[in-house]
Image: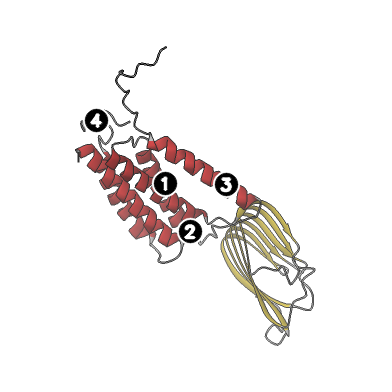
Amino acid sequence: MSASRRRGLIAGMLFAAMGIMFLLEALEVYTIAPSTLWPVLLVVLGIAVLAGIGGDSEGDGQGPVS
Amino acid sequence: MSYDPYAPEEPRRPIAVGPLVWGIILIVVGVGWLLSTLEVATIPWRAALAIVLVIVGIAMSAAAASGASTEGLFGAGVTLAIILALLSTFASTFTLPLAGGIGERSLSPTIATLESEYNLLAGQMVINLEQVQFPEGETRIEVGVTFGQVDIVNIPDDVAVSVSAHVTAGEAHLLGSRWDGVSIDQTKTDAGFAEAPRKLVIDVQVGFGQLGVRR
């Protein structure tokens, strides 16, 4: 699997995981304190941004995917 | 142009998953909004947005794995995550009732149609209890309005009332008493409530706006 595909895959899985986390919180399965939520969100978004860098432009042998 | 069976096949264009997912999201949100406006269903918007984020994540992973375009999905994922975090912070800080539809509601329930919970995201709601013949014992109603005004009016005289109200910012009129400002937390109970045969307990949460409870 090319680097760009892997990065898109990682960013997608992180978004799905965040979605599940927010869904459980909205359904009151648990609560997240804002003081915990924002630092965690920054870290996760930072990882997603790093994973997404060049995700659509790096060569993977199939041309641009955009 | 004549058909040439030996002509090389044109390479298939990869499906652009971004516009596809966005199209589906817009349709789902539009239908949800419409159902909410028509009072067919109450949409829990925070949960709905979280589901959309899950869909975006799965679509992005699937697109990346298959080599299709993920254009637009990354920005959508980041935007949704930030919106959800803001809503979560807002809800936990201000204890806002983030549920219900948008618009004007004028309700005159009977005891048969009286619901235990009424929610409105934004707008104006009037709950007229004139036609409700309350049974003996305790009847409970929970009301939540995020932005706007709610009035619970014409409470029958043969019912003793206890109202607990929280208004994040705005004004509250409870059975003849008035408060305004931010973080209003008040309870008003009729004299003789404990001994009354018919009791009505109202729990109201208003985010930003006005609340009125009167006979």
Residue with the mark numbered 4: A62
Q: Chain of mark 1?
A: B
Q: Chain of mark 2?
A: B
Judged from the image, the secondary structure of the residue bearing numbered disc 3 is: helix
Nearest to viewer (mark 3 / mark 4): 4
Residue B91, numbered label = 2
**Same chain for the residues under marks 3 and 4 in the image:** no
Camera-side residue of B149 and B121: B121
Q: Of the residues shown, which amino acid type is indicated by label 4?
A: Gln
| First of labels 2, 3 by sequence position | 3
**Same chain for the residues under marks 2 and 4 in the image:** no
**Same chain for the residues under marks 2 and 3 in the image:** yes
Q: Of the residues shown, which amino acid type is indicated by label 1?
A: Leu
| First of labels 2, 1 by sequence position | 1
Residue with the mark numbered 1: B80
Q: Distance of mark 3 from mark 4, alpha carbons?
A: 37 Å
Q: Of the residues shown, which amino acid type is indicated by label 3?
A: Val
Residue B181's spot in the image, x, y percent? 59, 59
Q: Where is B123 relative to B163, above or below? A: above
Cβ atoms at labels 1 and 3 below 8 Å apart: no
Specify the quadrant that holds the C terminus of chain B: bottom right
Q: Residues within 10 Å of mark 1 (few under 14, many from 20)?
A: many
Q: Is residue B121 visible?
A: no
Residue B8 appears in which quarter of the rendering?
A: top left
Q: Of the residues shown, which amino acid type is indicated by label 2?
A: Ala
